Image (cartoon, rainbow, N blue to C red):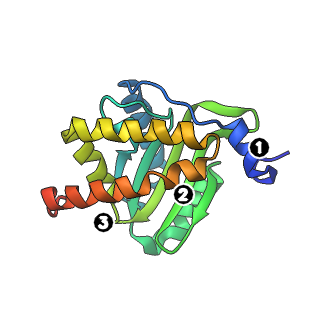
């Protein structure tokens, strides 16, 4: 059986949400994957960044490293093909973004797990979110508390867990854009 043939419920069982303490090891894991992506995608990359909870200091996180790869979106088909040919799993695609996973196997998580977010250069709310939470530990603690509450309420449903964070994320991005103006 292949992952794409499994029901959502089976996938949630195989890949449960788990939380760990954030450590510097995630920076190293990001750095290693960044090198692989730069080698693979070369000149297609306009900017590559470590995002998600593993990039936010002092909060519990899922042991999944999120990476934002910003490109000229006219090249999205070339980038998509290179990632698919290299074993990344296409998770979703729309007119503004393509998402890939790496580290998901038929036996569960690999040692290193990644979510790769391909977006048009400048579509980078995740960078505002990351920076604001790193600069505001109290707000980061609120985010951690929300994530743990949503996990307890919705496990194992990843979709409801993720949807439950959207209002908070939007609020923080709005605050960050006001504070940082045109940082990105």
Q: Position of residue 122 (x, y in %)?
A: 30, 66
Q: Position of residue 159 (x, y in %)?
A: 59, 53
The answer, for residue 184, to whether it is visible in the render is no
Label 3 belongs to which residue? 122
Which numbered disc flags the more N-terminal residue, 2 or 1? 1
Please tell me whether mark 2 or mark 1 is closer to you in this view.
1
Q: Nearer the viewer, residue 184 or 44?
A: 184
Number of numbered markers: 3
Answer few, some or many: residues within 10 Å of disc 2's Cα (few below 14, many 20 plus, some between 14 and 19): some
Label 1 belongs to which residue? 10
Mark 3, secondary structure of its residue:
loop
**In 3D space, how far apart are the residues under numbered discs 2 and 1 (Cα atoms)?**
21 Å
Q: Position of residue 163 (x, y in %)?
A: 51, 55
Pick the quarter of the image with the C terminus.
bottom left
Answer few, some or many: residues within 10 Å of disc 3's Cα (few below 14, many 20 plus, some between 14 and 19): few
Label 2 belongs to which residue? 99
Which numbered disc flags the more N-terminal residue, 2 or 3? 2
Residue at 36% across / 51% down in the picture? 48
Left/right placement of residue 121 relative to residue 149 reads left
**In 3D space, how far apart are the residues under numbered discs 3 and 1 (Cα atoms)?**
36 Å
**In 3D space, how far apart are the residues under numbered discs 2 and 3 (Cα atoms)?**
16 Å
Residue at 41% across / 55% down in the picture? 69
Mark 2, secondary structure of its residue:
strand
Pick the quarter of the image with the N terminus.
top right
The answer, for residue 116, to whether it is visible in the render is yes
Mark number displayed over residue 176: none
Which numbered disc flags the more N-terminal residue, 3 or 1? 1
Query: Residue 92's image quarter?
Result: bottom right
Left/right placement of residue 172 relative to residue 74 reads left
Vertical side of 6 occupied by 31: above or below: above
Residue at 64% across / 54% down in the picture? 85
Mark 1, secondary structure of its residue:
helix
């Amino acid at each position: 059986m292949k992952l794409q043939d499994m029901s959502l419920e089976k996938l949630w069982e195989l890949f449960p949400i788990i939380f760990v303490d954030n450590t510097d090891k995630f920076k190293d894991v990001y750095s290693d994957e960044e090198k692989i992506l730069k080698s693979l995608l070369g000149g297609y990359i306009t900017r590559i960044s470590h995002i998600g909870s593993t990039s936010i200091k002092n909060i519990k996180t899922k042991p999944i490293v999120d990476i934002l790869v910003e490109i000229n979106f006219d090249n999205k088909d070339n980038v998509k093909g290179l990632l698919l040919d290299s074993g990344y799993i296409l998770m979703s695609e729309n007119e503004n973004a393509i998402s890939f996973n790496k580290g998901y196997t038929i036996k569960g998580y690999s040692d290193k797990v990644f979510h790769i977010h391909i977006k048009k250069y400048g579509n980078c709310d995740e960078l505002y979110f990351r920076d604001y939470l790193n600069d505001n530990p109290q707000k980061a603690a609120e985010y951690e508390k929300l994530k743990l509450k949503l996990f307890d309420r919705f496990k194992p449903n990843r979709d409801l867990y993720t949807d439950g964070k959207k209002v908070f994320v939007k609020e923080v991005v709005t605050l960050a854009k006001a504070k940082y103006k045109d940082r990105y």
